[in-house]
Amino acid sequence: MDAVRVRFAPSPTGYLHIGGARTALYDWLLARKTGGQFILRIEDTDRNRYVADAVQDIKDSLRWLGLDWDEGPDAGGEVGPYFQSERLNIYQKYATQLVEAGKAYYCFCTPERLEEMRKKQEQAGEPSGYDRHCRELSAEEVEKKLAAGQKYVIRFKVPLTGKTQVHDELRGEMVFDHQTLDDFVVLKSDGFPTYHLASVVDDHLMGISHVIRGEEWIISLPRHFLLYAAFGWTPPAFVHLPIFLAPDGKGKLSKRHGATGVHEFKEKGYLPEALVNFLLLLGWHPATDQELFTLDQAVEAFSVERINTSPVNFSLDKLDWFNGIYIRQLSHEELAKRALPFLQKDGLLPDPCPPEQFAYLVRLMPLVQERIKLLSDISDAVGYFLREEIDPPAPELLLGKKGTVEQVTAILAKVETVLSQTADFSEENLERTLRALAEELQIKAGQLFMPVRVAVTGQTATPGLFQLLAALGQKKVLPRLKQAVAVLQQTGMEGAST
RNA sequence: GGUCCCAUCGUCUAGGGGUUAGGACACCGCCCUUUCACGGCGGCGGCAGGGGUUCGAAUCCCCUUGGGACUACCA
């Protein structure tokens, strides 16, 4: 086989979709696996749906995922330009060539006529498709209309009879009857090509060996094979990926089903490592039971043959699990680095973050690392460390299920006294001290620990108490204990007066 | 409607003539434990249905059913 050259060819009509990200991943994997090239090509042939920021988002998202391209925007390459809008003369040349060879023709039908035609077909229950109204226009008629400046498109002349056999690497041979195909447009009236023409011409000119794309293109495959045949070119290998279904299995995944843009996953606090691993296994499976893959390991294991063909429900549960795994694998320093933007966004740390505060953040990471699933969980997890004060905890929280106001008030007051008398706020000393205190008061450790936990954090679910107190420091712990005592005293008085 | 694709636990999937149908996520239980997590152990749960072929089908064939894609001068 010749050198592998694959392309990811998104249309800049919006942000990079999660489905597109998987396509790009598989493209990239195949290229890296085979030592071939991964090409990024921007298919901006729809001027109506063009979104200005889309190209930037696509590039940013690809880079964030770790998928670098060898040719394309910002990378250059021998067979550019890599923006289709800069290749219009090429498409026009090939479209004209088709017309001259009698394999395509000018069509002057107005959108209104086509609309009407469609309506009639629908009413009559007939198959939809262009009725070939302009297919047999004489050369003179065409000349006249052209000279008169009439708008036109160029349509491909699909053979009226016969069949086209196409090949998909995963599904094998498929046969399409020409009678079910209509004369599709290859060049639009604004001089831009349609996807069919542009992708076929570019894939050929760019030496693409494998076209990896979504399953929704299967139905267009015969058109593409017809085009290759008309030009006398050999088609590349086609690999159609199973589409992503909505989590409920009802229809194609779309924005209505939550996050679908790669950048949204980033903003939600997912790690690129996790997203890549998740996407890797959505439609592909190694021959082994391995579930965790770095990009390098994925390159090693990847093979086109093991891509699945059945549609995939896009359900996020497993992604969350992957994210937890990868968060736990990060060094404390790295976790802090990645979490920082989320804390800054929530106003818990300044931007830029001074070194001492960052160092403190790093210090907190071991306490929360195995407790967060998303980077965005970080603010809740470390908020009470970073804030000078916390809101007074609710009395019910302080008391727990069985505690009485008198008892818990006494416990907390005692803890406050004891902790104010020690200068050693190490975990070891804290544990020794508090366990001894529980014994002295003749209560179970838990009866002592829980009120303290709530008093200093306002929460019942926290990291280990001694780690937490040590990290918080005496300066924050004592006032919070006092505050909790005050809350309970207040409650006690109210209780007495009613 | 027409054309095409697909069909194993709720989800992602392994398995492609003889398996107690395997794994992972989720869920449930137990253990660890100062709470929550993490971790460990265990459990629940599946071959869409019907016909063939075969000594024997989850596996091969056909039909049905179900799901999905496409049906633009969008990609």
Image (tube, coloured by chain):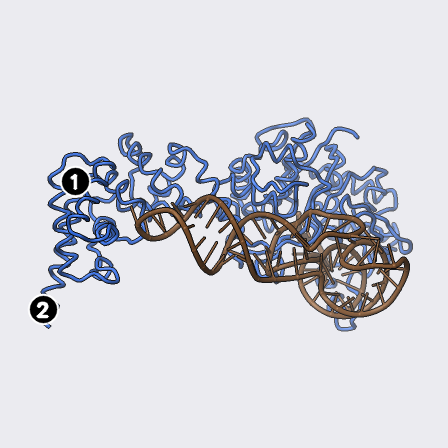
Chain colours: A blue, B brown
Q: Is residue A195 left or right of residue A398?
A: right
Q: Position of residue B57 (x, y in %)?
A: 79, 59
Report which residue position mark 1 lands on.
A475
Residue nearest the observer in this picture, A361 or A401: A401
- Compared with A260, A343 (above or below) is above
Q: Position of residue B11 (x, y in %)?
A: 60, 56
- Compared with A26, A152 (above or below) is below
- For residue A45, which quarter of the picture? top right
Residue at image coords 83%, 45%: A99
Mark 2 closeness class: few <14, some 14–19, many ≥20 residues within 10 Å: few
Report which residue position mark 2 lands on.
A496
Q: Which mark is residue A5?
A: none
User: Which amino acid does the dot numbered 1 rest on?
Assistant: Lys
Q: Chain of mark 1?
A: A
Residue nearest the observer in this picture, A226 or A139: A226
Spatial CA span between label 2 and label 1:
33 Å
Label 1 residue SS? helix
In this view of the protein, can residue A120 be seen by the observer? Answer: no
Q: Chain of mark 2?
A: A
Residue nearest the observer in this picture, A473 or A280: A473
